[in-house]
Image (cartoon, helix red, strand yellow):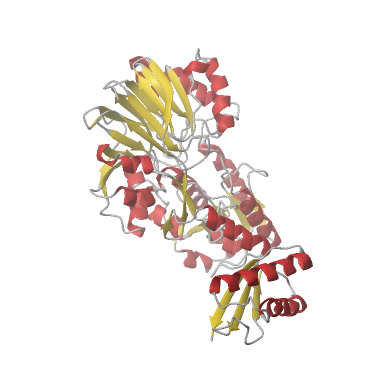
Amino acid sequence: MPQDRVKVIPLGGVGEIGKNLAVVETTDDLIVVDSGVQFPGEELLGVDLVIPDVTYLKENRQKLRGIFITHGHEDHVGGLPYVIPQLGEPPIPIYATRLTHGLIEVKMREHRLTEAYQQLVVQPGDCLPIGASLTVEPFRVTHSIPDCVGFGITTPAGLIVFTGDFKFDYTPVDGRLSDFGKLAEFGERGVLALFCDSTRVESPGFTPSERTLDSSFDKIFSTAQGRIIVTTFASNISRVQQILDTAYRFNRRVGLVGRSLESNASVARELGYLEPPEATLFRADEVNRLPMHDAVFITTGSQGEPTSALTRIANNDHRFIKLTVGDTVVLSGTPVPGNEIAVDRTINNLFKRGAEVVYNALMRVHVSGHGAQEELKLMLSLIRPRFLVPVHGEPRQQILFRRIAYDFGLTDGDILIIENGDAVELEPGRAWIGNKVTAGRVLVDGLTVGDVGHVVLRDRRHLAQDGLLMVSLVVDKETGHPLAVPEIVQRGFLHEPEQLLERARNVVMEALDGGPNVTAEHGLLNQKIRASLGKFVYESTRRRPMILPVVTEV
């Protein structure tokens, strides 16, 4: 690669929402921007998380100088505990702001990885020489969590800018505005390429400020007769602060429910990013003993996660919060793509429990952390990039952003619509899409990473659709003849299958009992059982359950 060339390769977060990870590579050095996860859709049965395939990083590990994190949301930091172990020794430098590092540390401690990375705190205004060929300048942006930054990266090809997730909030909860001066300075210096958040390009105007929610919360708190339960993202520290402030104004006490929410709030409080008013925040079990008109709970579960606090409450399965008529539940969040069905199910269950349920379709109780069309235009006006690469969006968002960019003098050749794995190659005054590298998704299931592939998912779908028949059979070791009637156990197949299973036992006996071709060889026995039983079941029910023979030789 020529000395004045740089490659920017997204391994995740382009053409999709979530699992953001981008590689910036020169001849001598390589850095990573963000390392996030994606929440699985319901078709990924049993899968907990989705992360990017980092084969390219492993192949170029010797050039890796560090991972730069824009902010503490899961789609930007959640992949670190799964990516870091794949990169091996020595400890990986991670550059992030104080709050973001605090949230990262919670994750790494849970995974026993505190020795696997080096914590390097950055702040807006820093100028960080990285390796022999890169300089990174963090700049403040507003989002739905405090301490967010984007990065200006000076490379041999020129200056490139990653916005991270952003909106231009003029009244942020923490009072810290986006660094308009730095953005304008970048524009004056000349930006070769802008990698810009496109998540909310479909929305006209400006995204409302977080502060616009205060009036909605005031209305809810002033009219609620019983307990108030508010759910939001566990990392949405600004929203937690707003709820605490509102509760204080209405003389209510607040308890946090959900391990991740409690951990994140503890970190934010310790670092000074969360400041509960006096005598407002208590343990959740203490709040639960208060009169109902005094109690507020902030919970996890805004995405309908099966084990989250709100889902347990909706299912009447929470250990101490039991909904009653008069309780008010506020969903201060919107579903990320793939979670809509789970969230709708949770809302329906809450209504069934008799709660008053408030969500964005009824009242504005959530605002996006991403800039709408006018904010994207303002970003383009400030940065004035030579080339634009829309990221953090699906194909429709990327293409709609391209249409907006036409008004700023950019042409199709100046706007690169890319996919994960596409190498954006940059030289002074030039940009093009080069060769594709390995990119894809890796599925996280429990403690295993990448062990769930197409075959496993196919089997899980099979089980979910048609159920399981397990045939337990004792046969003669020499002849393969059954020595007793087989036992057949079913799961997820039929509600009252006794008559069918009795006939199924006879089918298995007839297939194996008698005839000179019967053999005790395991593979053939299993094949005979599957073939005969599968044919019978399909003809009887038009279903194809998974058939699992368990043969014991005597």
Q: Is residue 295 visible?
A: no
- Position in image of residue 528 (x %, y %): 64, 71
Give the residue displayed 54% in from the left and 70% down from the top: 319
Q: Nearer the viewer, residue 23 or 269?
A: 23
Residue at 72% in and 70% down = 494
Q: Give x and y (percent) for residue 381.
A: 46, 18
Kindly give the residue lying farthest to the top in the view shown: 409
Q: Position of residue 21 (x, y in %)?
A: 41, 39
Look at the image and tell me whether residue 303 can be seen. Answer: yes
Q: Residue furthest left?
A: 132
Query: x and y percent of residue 343 in the render?
Result: 62, 52
Q: Is 368 placed left or right of 490 in the picture?
A: left
**Residue 49 drawn above or below residue 211:** below
Residue at 37 percent of width and 19 percent of height: 191
Residue at 46% over, 25% down: 389
The vertical placement of 255 against 536, above or below, is: above
Query: Is residue 204 found left or right of 289 in the rendered image?
Result: right
